[in-house]
Image: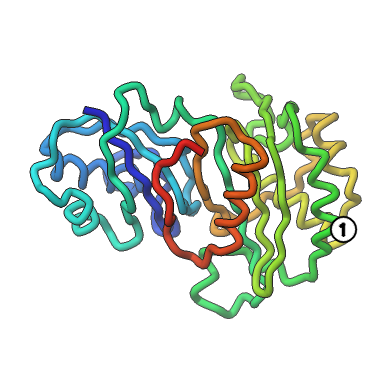
Amino acid sequence: MRWAALVSYDGSQFHGFSVQPKGIETVGEALTCALNIVFQSSIELVVAGRTDKGVHAVGQVISFDAGKPRTERPLRSLNRLLPSSIRVHHLEETEEWFSARYSAKYRCYVFRINKIGADSPFLTERSWYVGETLDVKRMQTAAMALVGRHDFKAFCKSGGRDGRPTKRVLYGVEVLESKNFVDIVLWSNSFCHQMVRSIVSLLVEVGCGRRRGVVLREAIISGERSIIHSVAPPGGLYLFGVGYSSFNQESRRLWLDRVKSWEFTGPNWRVERV
């Protein structure tokens, strides 16, 4: 039987999602251990997007093969076994062909910048306090240069030197401002290592007036990693959700509604084909 689950986690205390050498805590390791107990099996997880150290998730999706769980309330049992920083919100039997990773059409990431200040202990590891007023309209205009199919070599940590492909399709970027936050929302078929944090860093420099808006287009055209002076901190980054059907205006509207109503809560949706 194949199962799918919707998971959220605070990544502050974890060394990313992927299982690391023994003794290094990761989200994937904690989930695998809990699933092994509940399903009385050796579980191999497939994950929609492997998040880095310190990065969070609102709507991460995992899939795995296992028989019937040993309990009639497997969701409750899983959450009792997991640390409080990881929650499984939905667990369901799914089609045999479904893969959390390979069935995904796109991922939605959100980077949260807080306007409240650096003094709140509740926001330090969950958002980025820039400390300067951001010109959100200028950021949104500059971000449009990224939309479409491009080589994002300049925005990938390796700069393409590791031989991995750096071409991606960015379906959309939105810069949303509310009373307390500026949220940068991005949808892409996939993201290379540190791609979102590099984009956010450059957009913040544009919003603060330190760089011209055309710098994002220049980065795309040149492919020069040196244009990116720094990357945004991991604590503001969230894998917000995963789409399993083609990205369109309706799905865009749906994700934006979810982001706008989000207040550090878990997902209120299931593993949908959106």
Instruction: Please name whichever residue, 49 or 55, is drawn nearer the observer in this view of the structure.
Output: 49
Q: Residue at x 35, y 60 (%)?
A: 85
Residue 109 image point, x, y percent: 58, 47
| Amino acid type shown at disc 1 | Arg
Secondary structure type for disc 1: loop
Instruction: Please name whichever residue, 124 or 94, is drawn nearer the observer in this view of the structure.
Output: 94
Mark 1 lies on residue? 210
Q: Residue at x 32, y 37 (%)?
A: 4
Residue 236 image point, x, y percent: 58, 58
Residue 116 image point, x, y percent: 64, 77
Quadrant for residue 118, please give it: bottom right
- Rendered-image quadrant of the N terminus: top left
Instruction: Please name whichever residue, 151 or 240, is drawn nearer the observer in this view of the structure.
Output: 240
Quadrant for residue 64, please give it: top left
Bin the neighbour count of mark 1 within 10 Å (Cα to Cα): few under 14, some 14-19, many 20 and up.
Answer: few
Q: Residue at x 91, y 50 (%)?
A: 212
Residue projecting furthest to the bottom: 119
